[in-house]
Amino acid sequence: MLTIYVDPKQQDQVVQLSDQDRGYLSVSKQANTARYTFYFVGHQHPSFWHDGKLTDGAEETVRTIDGVQHYRIAFR
């Protein structure tokens, strides 16, 4: 499982993963909630979004044609 380190006080930001890769977090508003979109460059880590409140310790499972990736969110 990879950990994504997020600053909960920032909206859009560069994020770091526990394997030292980097990505980008973009926050947008959807109907009645926030959408947190995590973008990663290349094919090593699939990008994904999370609707609703982002919490410390939240876990996401992303399934793609390349397999399954597990992420954990950690607030810094």
Image (spheres, rainbow, N blue to C red):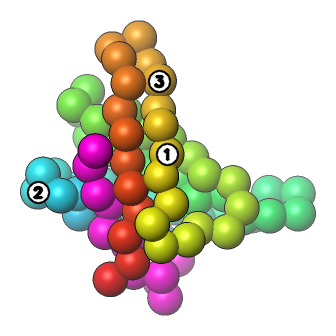
Query: What's the distance in space between the residues labelled 2 and 1, CA to CA?
Result: 19 Å
The image's mark for residue 63 is 3
Asked if the magenta segment contains residue 57, the reply would be: no
Q: Which residues are magenta?
A: 1-11
Circle 1 is placed at which residue position?
A: 60
Query: What's the distance in space between the residues labelled 2 and 3, CA to CA?
Result: 22 Å
In the rendered structure, the answer to whether residue 43 lies left or right of residue 12 reads left
Q: Secondary structure at mark 2?
A: loop
Residue type at numbered disc 2: Gln
Asked if the magenta segment contains residue 8, the reply would be: yes
Where's residue 20, x and y in %? Answer: 11, 57
Q: Is residue 46 visible?
A: yes
Point out the tag, 2 or 1, that comes first from the N-terminus. 2
Q: Secondary structure at mark 3?
A: strand
Point out the tag, 2 or 3, that comes first from the N-terminus. 2
Circle 2 is placed at which residue position?
A: 20
Residue 69 in the image: above or below residue 65: below
| Residue at screen point 58% across, 59% down | 36
In the rendered structure, the answer to whether residue 64 lies left or right of residue 49 reads left
Furthest-bottom residue in this view: 9
Q: Residues within 10 Å of mark 3 (few under 14, many from 20)?
A: few
Where's residue 56, x and y in %? Answer: 47, 73
| Residue at screen point 41% across, 11% down | 65
| Residue at screen point 88% across, 57% down | 31
Where's residue 53, x and y in %? Answer: 67, 68
